[in-house]
Image: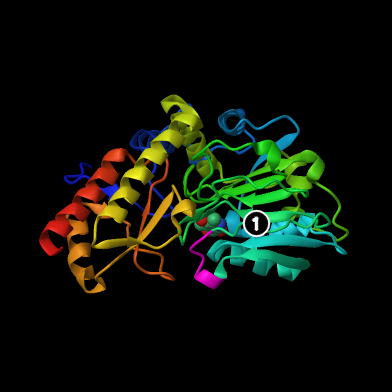
Amino acid sequence: MVLTKKIHNFSAGPAILPQEVLKEAAEGILDFTKGLSILEISHRSKEFEAVLEEAKSLVKELLGVPDGYSILFLHGGARLQFVMAPLNQLTVNGYAAYVNTGTWATGAIKEAKIIGKVNVIASSEDKKFTYIPKGFTIPADADYLHLTSNNTVYGTQYRQLLESPVPVICDMSSDIMSRKINVSKFALIYAGAQKNMGPAGTTLVIIKNDFIKDPGRTVPTMMSYKIHVENNSLYNTPSVYAIFVCMLTMRWLKKVGGVEYIEKKNREKADYLYAEVDRNPLFRGVTVKEDRSVMNATFVLSKPELETTFNQMASEAGLSGIKGHRSVGGYRASLYNALPFESVKALVEVMQEFERKKG
Ligand SMILES: *Cc1c(COP(=O)(O)O)cnc(C)c1O
């Protein structure tokens, strides 16, 4: 199959993967080992064991995960972690501190409240989640603090790590492996794979071993971090294929230069696009500049009546997936690791052409 037109994929997730990864993923379906497809071998075979071990070691290497942490690939998406985290870590008599920075943080809070006591210690809901709350105090007696590092829907992102007196749980679904992080500052990191590290179907969990404790309630077996750690993500059949494609994507990331390299590239892409959003009188950013996301750039038209024209120009130029989230409208260009700079250039060219025609 040959595509006649270059498609620039700005999808928020499931999102763009490197072309070479897609090819290898396709080959794995047809012939992974000895004429067998990756789809038809046992998850307990030594061939899959090698995939799982390589995926884990790539996570360790790319993110600099220190000793004393376990790396899991689980089912259920980031949303299952909204429940699993409090179920395992929120004690029966204790409470958890949450920061509400958008749609996903709101979802995490809602689920945690089903399990136990939650204090929302800071929120940017007052201004439609267009900024990251700052200067709040983290209570020293909370079981944990829950953060969402990047707000996929509204396009804001923590620039600075918070110093916390209590263990930090962080939903990194939409910026995992996009920038260097100090894993030792977190007790639990989780990320649905489908934004920045692979296809949908598996969720990366990095958990500090001595954070796993008895919350004082019975945790169903499939929801227990302890069980999944003891069984090396193989308590039940894991998402074999999704883990395989994550491994391929991480191999690619390592080959191109790792997280440090991709962080620079991601910055360049975001700076280039935001510069045009700020310069071009037909566009306007929607979030506070210092909190702008490097992964999901959101913007609106200063003349909304020109929407149809802009949409048409964008689609003719092969720009895909720039429509804003259904809850906020406007535009959102997701600039994940695999998106090449030339795609951002193509978007900026359309914005400039639009200005020449309609400005
Ligand atoms: C997409 C997303 C989710 C939801 O992930 P699922 O894997 O669909 O459950 C949660 N949190 C953040 C920050 C996201 O971007």
Residue 73: quadrant of the picture: top right
| Percent coordinates x, y for residue 354 in the rendering | 16, 59
Residue 129 magenta-highlighted:
yes
Q: What residue lies at 75% left-to-right and 66% top-to-bottom?
A: 118
Query: Residue 76 or 155: which is nearer the viewer?
Result: 155
Query: In screen coordinates, is 21 left or right of 243?
Result: left
Return the residue found at the far bottom: 305
The vertical placement of 88 against 102, above or below, is above
| Percent coordinates x, y for residue 328 in the rendering | 42, 69
* Image quadrant where one finds the C terminus: bottom left
Query: Residue 141 or 59: which is nearer the viewer?
Result: 141
Q: What residue lies at 23% left-to-right and 62% top-to-bottom?
A: 282
Query: Residue 261 or 33: which is nearer the viewer?
Result: 261
Q: What residue lies at 70% left-to-right and 37% top-to-bottom?
A: 184
Query: In screen coordinates, is 15 left or right of 291?
Result: left
Residue 181 magenta-highlighted:
no
* Image quadrant where one finds the N terminus: top left
Residue occupied by mark 1: 135
Q: Answer with the quadrant where ligand 1 appears in the image.
A: bottom right
Q: What residue lies at 15% left-to-right and 54% top-to-bottom?
A: 353
Q: Which residues are magenta?
A: 126-131
Prevailing SS of the magenta stretch? loop
Query: In screen coordinates, is 232 left or right of 351?
Result: right
Mark 1 residue element: loop
Q: Is residue 36 visible?
A: no
| Percent coordinates x, y for residue 32 in the rendering | 46, 31
| Percent coordinates x, y for residue 231 in the rendering | 74, 40
